[in-house]
Image: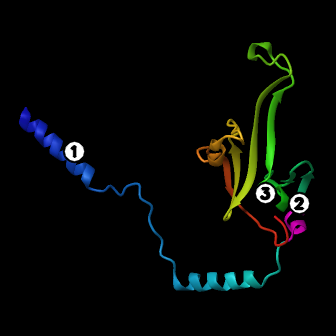
Amino acid sequence: MKKQLYLLLIFSMLCSVVPFKGFAQAKKKASVEKTAEIKKDSTAKDTAKKVTLTDQVKSCKKTEGFFTLYQDTATGRIKLYIRKNQFNEEFLYQSFSMGGPAELFLNQNMIRETWLFKIRKNFERLEFVRSNASFYYDPKSPLSKAANVDVSEAIFFSEKLQRKIHWEY
């Protein structure tokens, strides 16, 4: 019995050491012609005219508000337009319910959540950051010198910038 147990243990250890390539993706080798074609395309893109906002939103429905939204009428994709002066500014998010089923405790107008957030650009990513406003430091106290040292911010949404307009994004 012990011999079978040892053989089973050794077999399982060998199976875990040997790499299994059943789920690995096969790598495709790029031909020389394709790489030359890609280089030609990249130089052609550099010499092309710069993309403007009106070119990007030709077939979109515009919804104005604090942030301007453009919805593509063909695909339904939504684009968010953020002005330069809206970066690194704090905004107040407030969620409330106007009324609803009493079983869900939505029978009155009630405030659900309120918090601060800001939008920042980190390299080629757009980040929505929730600020932690739970702490107050008395300016007269010596502890105020270390204010916001231990307070962290939470990134609740991060997305790669799709297009950047040369004059404003």
Name the residue carrying label 3: 87
* Nearer-N-terminus badge (1/2): 1
Where does residue 23 sit, x and y in percent of width and height?
41, 54
Which residue occupies the extreme top position in the image? 103
Q: Residue at x 75, y 49 (%)?
A: 118
| Label whose residue precedes the other's in the sequence (1 or 3) | 1
In this rendering, does residue 83 appear at all?
no
**Tag of residue 12:** 1
Vertical placement of residue 147 versus 104, above or below: below
Under circle 1, the secondary element is helix
Please identify, in this view, whether the residue under mark 1 or under mark 3 is nearer the observer.
3
Q: Is residue 27 left or right of residue 58?
A: left
Report the front residue among 3 and 28: 3
Q: Is residue 101 visible?
A: yes
Q: Is residue 154 above or below residue 52?
A: above
The magenta region covers: 52-59
Query: Which residue does the image show at 77% across and 67% down from the upper left?
Result: 164
The quadrant of the image that shows the C terminus is bottom right
Residue 80 % position (x, y):
81, 54
Going from N to C along the chain, the mark reached first, 2 or 3, is: 2
Q: Quadrant of residue 41?
A: bottom right
Secondary structure beneath label 2: loop
Tell me if residue 100 is in the magenta stretch: no
Query: Which amino acid does the dot numbered 1 rest on?
Result: Ser
Instruction: Pinpoint residue 78: horizontal percent, then vertical percent.
Output: 80, 52
Residues at marks 2 and 3, CA–CA distance in whole angstroms: 27 Å
Q: Is residue 122 above or below residue 34?
A: above
Label 2 is placed on what type of residue?
A: Ser
Instruction: Identify the disc placed on residue 59.
Output: 2
Camera-near label (2 vs 3) is: 3
